[in-house]
Image: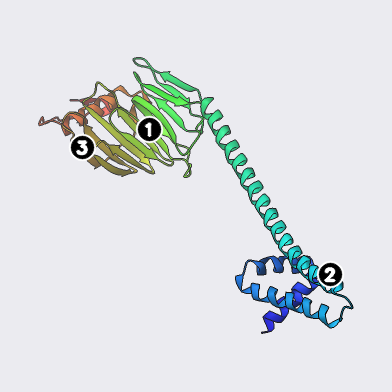
Amino acid sequence: MKNTENNKSLYRRYLDDLYTTEDARQLLNNLHDSDNNEILNELSSDVWEEAATQQPLTDLEREHYKREARQLLKRIEHKKRTWFRRIAVATVSTAAIICLVLGGIHYLKHQNEQQIIYLEASTSYGERKQILLPDGTQLTLNSCSHVRYPNSFIGKERKIELEGEGYFQVYRNEEQPFIVSTHRFNVHVLGTCFDIKSYTSDEIVSVEVESGKVQVDLPEAMMRLKGKEQVLINTISGEYSKRREERPVAIWKKADCVSTVLRYVMWLRNWSECTIAVLHLPMGNSII
């Protein structure tokens, strides 16, 4: 009952142009409610009764008061439609602004993608090369290797292509994973140091992790490696061997021919039935 009287009082103030901005907002909310139709009918009757109590002298005056009551109700409906139009215009304007902003962002992203230039670097026999990637990642490229990478990493990932062997010191960025793509597998990392050997002519390829963690994605398998772990993959049979390796990673970076030979000897021992003995002699010499 109290709410009904409050609403009638609100309509009265509105008809008399004695309302505030808050009153107008409340009035607009009330007009959405069909239950307020009864209040409007009561208000119309009240206006008519008030006109009747004044006892107009002529029928002409009586008709004048009736027209006045109808005009007041029409005024309420007109204001209601005006408020609806304003809300609709504001909604459409906001939607248009959002579309323009999103369109602008998409356009700028498209322009940036169109401006990406891919760079390439290669090494020949006996050559090594240091490469600084756009994100700060350091790559040491081994001999007879090739790398392809963009001049800027845009998007959700940092992806490069490698053929051959490379040692990576990846700049950590959890929001943009680093991916090395080879012909045989992909390696996903956030920030770590690791070595990839994946020459197309090799039957055995490998991934060695010095520190951190990496994920190796094979065509039909996935595995995770952490520091001091290595995986050897036979590209012919599809077999792979994961093991812990305490020796230094990427020993080829030190240009130590003996160490490099020993590395391949260990691979041969792991993937064949041969028994290979390595005799270490003084002064760093070895006999196989």
Which residue is at 39% across, 40% downward? Answer: 189
Residue 14 picture location, percent across and down: 78, 69
* Up-down relation of residue 43 to residue 180 (above or below): below
Residue 91: percent from left, percent from top:
64, 51
Q: Earlier in the sequence, mark 3 or mark 2?
A: 2
Q: Quadrant of the N terminus?
A: bottom right
Rendering coords of residue 206 (x, y %): 27, 32
Circle 2 packing at 10 Å, graded few (<14), some (14-19), many (20+), is few
Of circles 1 and 3, which is in front?
A: 1
Element type at mark 1: strand
Q: Nearer the viewer, residue 231 or 187?
A: 187
Residue 58 in the figure: left or right of residue 245? right
Label 3 belongs to which residue? 240
Any part of residue 248 in sight? no
Q: Amino acid at mark 3?
A: Tyr
Indicate the quadrant where residue 72 lies. Answer: bottom right
Q: Which mark is residue 99?
A: none
> Looking at the image, which is closer to me, 115 or 203?
115
Q: Secondary structure at mark 2?
A: helix
Q: Which residue is mark 2?
A: 64
Q: Nearer the viewer, mark 3 or mark 2?
A: 2
Q: Which residue is mark 1?
A: 180
